[in-house]
Image (cartoon, rainbow, N blue to C red):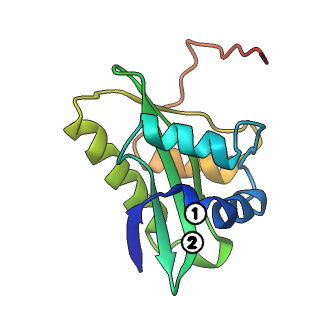
Amino acid sequence: MIIRQMKPEDWHQMMNLWQSTEGIGVGRSDTKEGLERFLNRNKGMSFVCEIDGNIVATIMCGHDGRRDFIYHLAVAENFRLQGIGKRLVEKALQELKNQGIHKCHIFVMKNNEKGKIFWSKMGFQKRDDIEVFSIDI
């Protein structure tokens, strides 16, 4: 098992993983070009787990200089409950700490019960004091 920085060349394998992972929302920004922009803007903060040359887990992490967001933490079904997701989150949070970021957020789909349990176990707390508003541009 190898945990390494995410690269734009990983996009095809990652997209296959995201599309087959319950609770992961794939949007129109999840193009290869969009990934490359994200990685260039947030150098060294997103990771993949590779086993036998295949990407089995991902985490995308990026910040605005004050707050961070984690996107697309996904672990292939047959590799779950082995601590891979936890290791990816810990690696991303350590990198955030190294860069002086002290707060991290994650969006979890309302129907993603497994995701809610995972993030709670990782120490994240559900916020009831804010609402998310979005606009397509």
For the point 35% across and 27% down, which residue is it? Answer: 103
Q: Label 1 is placed on what type of residue?
A: Asp
For the point 79% across and 18% down, which residue is it? Answer: 136
Residue 12 picture quarter = bottom right
Lateral position of residue 5 relative to residue 53, left or right: left
Image vertical order of residue 118 relative to residue 87, above or below: above
Q: Are marks 1 and 2 in contact (CB under 8 Å)?
A: yes
For the point 41% across and 52% down, which residue is it? Answer: 89
N-terminal label among 1 and 2: 1
Which quadrant is the C terminus positioned in?
top right
Residue on which disc 2 sits: 55
Q: Label 2 is placed on what type of residue?
A: Ile
Coordinates of residue 16 in the picture (x, y in percent)? 74, 64
Secondary structure found at label 1: helix
Coordinates of residue 94 in the picture (x, y in percent)? 26, 46
Question: For the residue carrying disc 2, how many other residues have a C-alpha within 10 Å: few (<14), some (14-19), or many (20+)?
Answer: many
Marker disc for residue 31: none
Image vertical order of residue 130 relative to residue 49, above or below: above
Image vertical order of residue 51 relative to residue 114, above or below: below
Which of 91 and 116 lies nearest the eye of the viewer? 91
Marker disc for residue 10: 1
